[in-house]
Image (cartoon, rainbow, N blue to C red):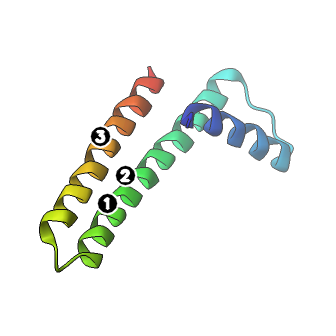
């Protein structure tokens, strides 16, 4: 999943919808805002998934914890990759 490319595509689509033209600096700023919003959504979704795992497995807390930890680790890796794209 390339969040940067999706954010840039969203900027292009928004400009087309609004019949607006942005210079390169403005387009990058808007793309950065969209990218941060997408990352925030990914983080929140990962938290919700972890809570859902814990809620659906109350009889086996150990299994729920293992699944939740695996989701957390994948989320940490995803956020690290996405943050690296900003540079």
The quarter of the rendered structure image containing the N terminus is top right
Q: Which residue is mark 2?
A: 43
**72 and 10: which is toward the camera:** 72
Label pair 2/1, CB-CB below 8 angstroms: yes
The quarter of the rendered structure image containing the C terminus is top left
28 vs 44: above or below: above
Horizontally, residue 41 falls left or right of residue 24, namely: left
**71 and 82: which is toward the camera:** 71
**20 and 63: which is toward the camera:** 63
Label 1 neighbour load within 10 Å: few <14, some 14-19, many 20+: some
Measure how far apart labels 2 and 1 are at the Cα level. 6 Å
Q: Which residue is mark 1?
A: 47
Label 2 neighbour load within 10 Å: few <14, some 14-19, many 20+: some
SS type, badge 2: helix
Q: Which residue is mark 3?
A: 76
Mark found first going from the N terminus, 1 or 3: 1
Label 3 or label 2, whichever lies nearer to me, is 3
Q: Residue placed at 44% from the left, 45% from the top?
A: 39
Horizontally, residue 24 falls left or right of residue 43, namely: right
Q: Residue placed at 74% from the left, 31% from the top?
A: 22
Q: Residue placed at 29% from the left, 68% from the top?
A: 53
User: In x, y percent, where is residue 82?
Assistant: 43, 33
SS type, badge 1: helix
Label 3 neighbour load within 10 Å: few <14, some 14-19, many 20+: some
User: In x, y percent, where is residue 56?
Assistant: 29, 77
SS type, badge 3: helix
Measure how far apart labels 1 and 3 are at the Cα level. 11 Å
Badge count = 3
């Amino acid at each position: 999943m390339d969040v940067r490319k999706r954010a840039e595509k969203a900027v292009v689509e928004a400009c087309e919808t609004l019949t607006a033209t942005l210079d390169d600096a403005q387009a990058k700023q808007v793309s950065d805002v969209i990218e941060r919003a997408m990352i925030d959504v990914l983080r929140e979704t990962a938290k919700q998934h972890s809570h859902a795992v814990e809620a659906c497995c109350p009889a086996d807390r150990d299994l729920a914890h293992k699944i939740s930890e695996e989701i957390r680790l994948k989320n940490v890796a995803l956020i690290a990759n996405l943050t690296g794209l900003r540079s």
